[in-house]
Amino acid sequence: MIYLDHNATTPVLPEVFEAMKPFFTDRWGNPSSSYRFGSELKGTIETARGQVAELIDARPSEVVFTGNATEANNSAIHAALKANPTKRHIITSQVEHSSVLNYCMALEKDGLRVTYLPVDREGLLNVADLEAAITDDTAVASLMWANNETGVLFPVADIARVCKSRGVLFHCDAVQAAGKLPIDVSKLAVDYLSMTGHKLGAPKGVGALYVHRKAPFSPYLYGGHQERGQRGGTENVALIVGFGKAAELAKANISAFEDTVRSLRDSLEEGILSAVPDAELNGHKSKRLSNTSSIAFRGVDSDALLMLLDQEGVCASSGSACLADSPDASHVITAMKPELHDERNTLRLSLGMEHTASSETWWLAAFVLRGFAASHEMEA
Ligand code: PLP
């Protein structure tokens, strides 16, 4: 199998699996219990909290563990609205993940007003559009760090500065950025920032929300006193340990990730773009994650192409895994290139650290091209 879909999910790293194992077999207590077999696990959770905090240069007390990033995203927007009950306006972008977009759309049905900022043909956001959209009624802006489909980066520092100067809370979905590029929240005026374990070598089902120590917060899940009353529900100790270990490894490997994966991605991408007529890159060439390549193949049905690649053992996608079963064109590609609104012709390739040799990249490119040729033949 050739796995080229790391933006959908990543393999659990062996060190992460080893770190988690005892918490399934021997140390399976409830951290809220008063006896030591349970209560000792509180310290285990705090170690993991420290590791996740370190990944983004936060204080451990600013990290709340959640069930996933979908919950973290919903929680942040919820907290910002709760803190500003008289403000009824949210700003987001047209290219956010469905965990932000669909929550915003649900809030619209409840009577809130939402501005969906556009992006240009390269997927970039214009901060002037954000400035123009802010009103006295704006409670929160929720804008992502890196796009999951194209890898395009938003100007997070500028966004944070504008939001702070206008008194608007800023939530950043950093799910795809965390572990792939350096993040230092201590130098950034961000109020909330979401992450998830399964994009950086931990299992699915554990996320985290950074909440700046001065940002307002109220729980999204009410329950027991877990997470200092910020998120009810018995902690998933094993997964939290796994997230902590994965965050520690990601922090240590961040520049290796950038260097190794970028050159492999570039040679794979250049190989495809130079060999396939009418293939076009989606997204800005350099303001982009080092591991992601989104390519539109004009006149090709991406579902057919993906099926053929699957038969060759290549795992890739046309966009977000969460929307893979939707018959519609990607909302991200449509926002960038409106003329593609009824086309599904995009292939997203997202690499990870296990792709190491450049020869392998060419082998992968050959697979992609074989799939491309076969799908053309099929259509003809
Ligand atoms: N935000 C972005 C940008 C994502 O790519 C994803 C996952 O695909 C999510 C949020 C949701 O993460 P989770 O699967 O942990 O809910």
Image (cartoon, rainbow, N blue to C red):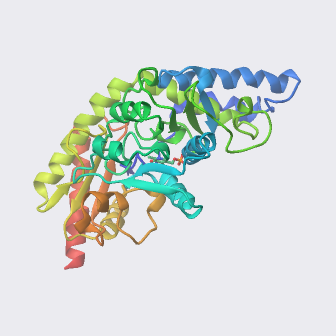
The structure residue drawn at horizontal position 74% and vertical position 40%, both measured from the top left corner, is 232
Q: For the view shown, which residue lies furthest in the right direction?
A: 35
Residue 318 is situated, as x and y percent measured from the top left of the image, at 35, 60
Residue 252 is situated, as x and y percent measured from the top left of the image, at 43, 21
The structure residue drawn at horizontal position 41% and vertical position 72%, both measured from the top left corner, is 327
Q: Depth check: 306 or 79 in front? A: 79
Q: For the C terminus, which image quadrant?
A: bottom left
Give above or below for 171 relative to 304.
Answer: above
133 relative to 238 in the view: left or right: left
Residue 130: which quarter of the image? Answer: top left
238 relative to 310 in the view: left or right: right
Residue 354 is situated, as x and y percent measured from the top left of the image, at 38, 36
Question: Can residue 87 be seen by looking at this rendering?
Answer: yes
Question: Can residue 357 be seen by looking at this rendering?
Answer: no
Q: For the view shown, which residue lies furthest in the bottom direction?
A: 380
Q: How many marks?
A: 0
Give above or below for 42 relative to 115.
Answer: above
161 relative to 44 in the view: left or right: left
Q: Depth check: 92 or 62 in front? A: 92
The structure residue drawn at horizontal position 22% and vertical position 35%, both measured from the top left corner, is 263
The structure residue drawn at horizontal position 37% and vertical position 41%, both measured from the top left corner, is 146
Residue 340 is situated, as x and y percent measured from the top left of the image, at 25, 67
237 relative to 257 in the view: left or right: right
